[in-house]
Every structure is written in C-alpha cells, then in structure tokens.
Image (cartoon, rainbow, N blue to C red):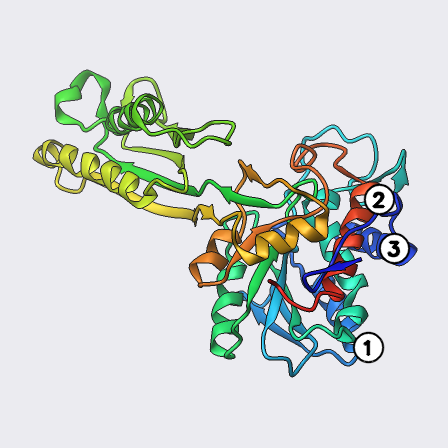
C-alpha cells in the first residue's frame, strides 16, 4: 500500500527470501575481523554488482589490504539515499562458542555467526535488492556504502566520505544499518579513546627524591579522570532515553614498572569518554591535557626529559538526528514503526551527519547479540529488513 509517495509496510513474512539468506550466510563465512583484510568480501560484492552492470568505487587503506566500496544503484538520477554498513567484525578469541563463529548456519529461527547481527545481514539484504534498486522508478538512486575498520574507530568511512565528496556525490540522506531491531535510532553517544604515555626518571627505590615516578604521575591524571566522571554523574544535565543519561569517563588499561625496588621510568594507560550528543568531548580532553601540563613543571625540576605524551586511538562523534527529519519518517514508515529510539553504542552516523547528510540508524538484529559468543540474528528480523528494502525500492519521495 502506498501513502504520500512511500510504500507502506504490510504484514511481512517471518522468513527471509532464500537469496537474502544465502548472501547473509556467505558474508558471515568470510573472516573480516578488523585485524585481517576485508578484500575477499569487498571483491565478492564488487563482482555481484558488476554482473548487474553496476560499477564500484574502491578506496583503500595505506597498505591496500582493506577497502571501502561505494556503488550507485540507479546511475544518472539527481541524488541518492545511502545504505551504509561496515564490513569488519570484532574477534572471538577467548569466547566460548558452541559452534564455528564462521559457520553461518541456520537453526532455531536464527542465523548464527560472527557479524550476523553486526552487521553483515543488513549488507546482504541491501545487496539482494540491488536489482530492484537499479530498476526502481524512484527519482533518487540508492548508494551502497561499505566501510572497513569501523570496529577500531570508524577509520575507513572517513576516506569513503572524502572520496564521495571529491566525486561530487551529494546524497539526500543516509540509513546506517546497525542492529536496532528495525526501530529507527536518532541519537547515540560519541566514543573518544586516548593513550597517555608518562616518561619519568628511574632510580633505586631508596633514592626516591632523585626520581620521577611515572606510575604516581599517571595516577594523578587517572584521579583527574575519576573526578571528571563523578562531576558528569553529579552535575551534567540528563539526556532521557539513554541507559546512562550522562557522559562517562573511564580508564580501561594501565601498565607500568619493572620491579618493586625500581622507581618506574615509564607508565601507560588508556581511557575513554562517551559523551552525550549535547556534550563536548574535545573540551573534556582539553581538561586532561591541562591537568597533565600543570604536573610537568615539578617533574622537569628533577629531569627535563620527563612529561606526558598523548596519542589518539579513536574519535567517533556522537550522533543527534531528529524524529522530524524526512529520513527518520521514511525509516519509520518502511519499518512499520511509530517510535524512535536512542542507542548506547557508537556508529558511523555522526560522521555522515557531520558531512551534512541527514542520517538515521536502522537495521536488523539486536546489539545485545553483537560482540558476544554465539552471535545471531533472528530470521524474522531479516524478513522485516527485506520488507524495508522492498518499500525503499518502491518509494517515490522522501517526504
């Protein structure tokens, strides 16, 4: 049924099509853990599209072991809607799986395997509808945008967006297919991670005044981070809808020292901020840097080579869309949902939004299954995503 130029979702089958399920199984069976190359998967999708006469743009990492893929389904149309997905997965080392993480087997109404929920099922369903998108009467094209290294900091998509801009592609909107149980998500927190390396001056532990204890200096900065976290929890205005409705700061790793009787020269720790869409993560990091610089004069009095060094691990911006955005309303109609949601996990949506592209997050499966042993996605979720794609192919207008 059509309303306002958009195909409305009717009662969908609880089972995906054989083609969509076959593609999802194929993608799950390709090992694309972030430490590995994703080229086998990228080339598979490139070849599938090429068989339909669709060309793909590939952008590579520095050593050309990984690539993004960007393809336009409906070439020649004035603008398009992006279907965005990341191709990498997290590893499964040390996890207690009951079957091969790369099996891609179907049982109990679910597709099992690493990446099944996060987020190869979405990519497979989009690919299975490529022909429909090419032949669609819609006035806009569908852009398939697949990235590398999302799981380690949304690295590849930055190159993809830059290449898209250089090519003069100006999309109307973007749908990021992360697992939201097919409920459109309009906000998530940012993820900013840093490494701090502290250089002190070693000495025998009986001569501490002649040393700079790197662990102790690092601990003072860790204490600052804890103070900031308590301040966020105590004072930051709440943002309803998040499990934790304020920004957070935490230290995840700490290393230092070589022996009990040696004042440590080196220490290292890693920390992160998860900022609300209304907060400023760069200002948070500036507080940490300022505190570190305030500690260095005393360190330099003992040894001028001492001090703090910071490396950025990842900076994934928060995302804030709107229930009133045309792409959000479109996603609601196609998914058959009246509601929207907010998610706790980071996605590439904030980067697309920063590029000026109205964005929503909506895809099959639940984040509670992602990154877990025995990851799975319900087949009913795949079927709902197929209905979404069929509706998108038949859509005449975003409004």
Labelled pair 2, 1 in contact (Cβ < 8 Å): no
Residue at coordinates 50% horizontally, 79% vertically from top-left? Answer: 168
Q: Earlier in the sequence, mark 2 or mark 1?
A: 1
Quarter containing the N terminus:
bottom right
Q: In terms of image quadrants, where is residue 91?
A: top right
Q: CA distance from mark 2 to mark 3?
A: 12 Å
Q: CA distance from mark 3 to mark 1?
A: 17 Å
Q: Nearer the viewer, mark 2 or mark 1?
A: 1
Image location of residue 22, percent across then percent down: 87, 55
Instruction: Describe residue 51's horizontal placement relative to residue 281 as left or right.
Output: right
How many C-alpha atoms fall within 10 Å of the one at disc 1: few (<14), some, or many (≥20)? few
Taking the view exactly as shown, the residue that stands out farthest to the left is 301
Residues 346 and 6: in front is 6
Q: Earlier in the sequence, mark 2 or mark 3?
A: 3
Image location of residue 44, percent across then percent down: 77, 66
Residue at coordinates 85% horizontally, 46% vertically from top-left? Answer: 11
Q: Earlier in the sequence, mark 3 or mark 1?
A: 3
Residue at coordinates 35% horizontally, 47% vertically from top-left? Answer: 311
Instruction: Describe residue 200's horizontal placement relative to residue 46 as left or right.
Output: left
Q: Nearer the viewer, mark 2 or mark 3?
A: 3
Can residue 62 be seen at all in this image of the molecule? no
Quarter containing the C terminus:
bottom right
Q: Which residue is mark 1?
A: 51
Q: Which residue is mark 3?
A: 22
Q: CA distance from mark 2 to mark 1?
A: 27 Å
Determine whether the residue tagged by mark 3 lies in a helix, strand or loop. helix
Q: Which residue is mark 2?
A: 103
Image location of residue 19, percent across then percent down: 89, 58
Instruction: Describe residue 65's horizontal placement relative to residue 221 as left or right.
Output: right
């Amino acid at each position: 049924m059509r309303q306002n130029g958009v195909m409305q979702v009717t009662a969908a089958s609880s089972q995906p099509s054989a083609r969509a399920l076959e593609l999802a199984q194929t993608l799950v069976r390709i090992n694309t853990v972030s430490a590995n190359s994703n080229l086998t998967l990228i080339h598979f999708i490139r070849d599938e599209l090429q068989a339909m006469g669709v060309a793909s743009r590939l952008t590579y990492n520095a050593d050309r072991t990984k690539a993004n893929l960007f393809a336009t389904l409906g070439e020649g149309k004035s603008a398009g809607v992006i279907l965005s997905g990341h191709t990498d997965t997290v590893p499964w080392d040390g996890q207690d799986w009951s079957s091969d993480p790369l099996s891609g087997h179907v049982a109990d109404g679910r597709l099992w395997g690493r990446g099944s929920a996060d987020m190869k099922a979405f990519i497979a369903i989009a690919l299975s509808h490529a022909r429909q998108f090419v032949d669609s009467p819609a006035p806009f094209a569908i852009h398939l945008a697949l990235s590398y290294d999302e799981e380690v900091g949304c690295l590849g998509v930055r190159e993809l967006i830059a290449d898209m801009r250089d090519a003069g592609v100006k999309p109307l909107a973007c749908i990021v297919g992360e697992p939201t149980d097919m409920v459109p998500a309009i906000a998530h927190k940012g993820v900013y991670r840093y490494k701090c390396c502290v250089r002190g001056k070693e000495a025998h532990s009986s001569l501490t005044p002649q040393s700079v204890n790197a662990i102790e200096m690092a601990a003072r900065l860790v204490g600052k981070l804890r103070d900031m976290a308590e301040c966020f929890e105590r004072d930051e205005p709440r943002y309803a809808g998040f499990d934790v409705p304020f920004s957070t700061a935490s230290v995840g790793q700490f290393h230092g020292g070589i022996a009990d009787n040696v004042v440590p020269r080196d220490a290292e720790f890693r920390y992160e901020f998860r900022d609300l869409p209304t907060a400023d993560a760069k200002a948070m990091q500036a507080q940490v840097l300022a505190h570190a610089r305030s500690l260095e004069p005393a360190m330099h009095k003992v040894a001028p080579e001492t001090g703090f060094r910071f490396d950025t691990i990842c900076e994934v911006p928060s995302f804030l869309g709107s229930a009133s955005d045309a792409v959000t309303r479109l996603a609601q109609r196609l998914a058959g949902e009246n509601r929207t949601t907010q998610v706790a996990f980071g996605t590439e949506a904030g980067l697309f939004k920063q590029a000026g592209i109205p964005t929503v997050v909506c895809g099959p499966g639940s984040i509670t299954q992602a990154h877990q042993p025995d990851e799975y996605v319900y087949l009913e979720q795949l079927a709902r995503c197929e209905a979404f794609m069929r509706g998108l192919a038949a859509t005449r207008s975003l409004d």
